[in-house]
Image: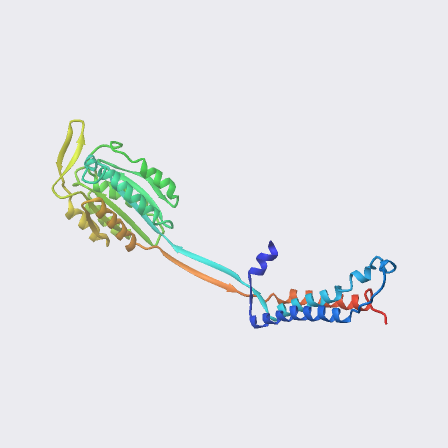
Amino acid sequence: MYIITYWKSLEFANAEWVWLLLIIPLLTAWYIWKRNRMQTVLTVSGVKPFLYRKAAKQKLKHLPFIFRMLALFFLIIALARPQSSISHKQVDVEGIDIVMALDVSGSMMAMDFRPNRLEACKNVMKTFVENRPTDRIGLVVYSGEAYTKCPLTSDHQTLLRSLESVKFGIIDDGTAIGDGLGTAINRLRESTAKSKVIVLLSDGVNNAGHIDPYSTADIAQEFGIRVYTIGCGTIGEAPISTPYGTLYTKVEIDEPLLKTVAQKTGGKYFRAQNKTKLKEVYEEIDKMEKTRITEYHFLNKPDEFFPFLCIALVLFLVEVMLRYTVLRIKP
């Protein structure tokens, strides 16, 4: 198996010499024809007196020719200059550190996105994470306050499990955009990545928390963090399922705030009015924040003719020794 693999890995610098291998079957045919011409026919009344066991020398009489053909085979391969390919690839990845800040306030229960805004956002964010295998990504959730659900990590399976476990009611209700943004900045401020990004999603108006969103945007700008903001929700009213049936709530998104935060930090504001648009938003962010991957390919082709030449020489010497010693034909 190793020999087959090794042979397949070879390339020939002088491949035209391989055509000389056709000489071997021609020489073999000529040898057989010549041996048949040398045989004579003798007619006798019985063959019993001629029955005898062939001597070892008689059995091995074709061995020198076999060794000569093998020597010729390896000599031709050596002349074709076989080369092995040694390939090496070095990949330099310049990753991006990304923190996703997700609004989990009560209004995210609205069913203008199916099955509701939160579950739709989780589904789209999952695809976003899967499409960025070389980046470190973290998750911050916020409503009336904010906390880190998953710190920056390259272990995306752990991140996705954390995202899946996000539910309503885990923290006090409200929409503390400033706190959510501030917590995300805190996860990125000591990052050494060349590119640091926050993707902040909200479906409401800043009405809770202890940090002013505008001041937080200034801090993000100082740390060189780009913030992409997403306003999530239809225009007008959205249905929400409650123990008392389906109620309709007014959709209020502080678009001026979200636009200002994005503009201050060199990011961009998006409005997603349905799940399809939300997917397009995350796809656009994915294209805008491309990870830089540089590949260096090294290819070396060392000559491998020497072993074949040595084998040919050894076979030729064995053939000569057999022909003029053990299998010598006396006149």
Looking at the picture, tell me which residue is in the foreground, 88 or 54: 54
What colour scheme was applied to this rendering of the protein? rainbow
Seen at 60% across and 65% down, the residue is: 304
> Going by the picture, which residue comes out furthest to the front?
45
Vertical relation: 267 (above or below) 251: below
Looking at the picture, tell me which residue is in the foreground, 266 or 307: 307
Looking at the picture, tell me which residue is in the foreground, 134 or 172: 134
Q: Is residue 101 left or right of residue 4?
A: left
Picture mark count: 0
Q: Is residue 184 left or right of residue 31?
A: left
Quadrant in which the C terminus is drawn: bottom right
Give percent across and percent down for residue 284. Answer: 26, 53
> Going by the picture, which residue comes out furthest to the right?
49
Seen at 19% across and 41% down, the residue is: 203
Vertical relation: 69 (above or below) 212: below
Among the 4 quarters of the image, the one containing residue 327 = bottom right
Looking at the picture, tell me which residue is in the foreground, 41 or 313: 41
Give percent across and percent down for residue 14. Answer: 57, 72
> Is residue 188 at least partly visible in the picture?
no
Vertical relation: 235 (above or below) 310: above
Among the 4 quarters of the image, the one containing residue 106 = top left
Q: Is residue 141 left or right of residue 66?
A: left
Q: Is residue 298 left or right of residue 123?
A: right
Seen at 23% across and 47% down, the residue is: 276
Give percent across and percent down for residue 33. Answer: 71, 70
> Is residue 171 at least partly visible in the picture?
yes
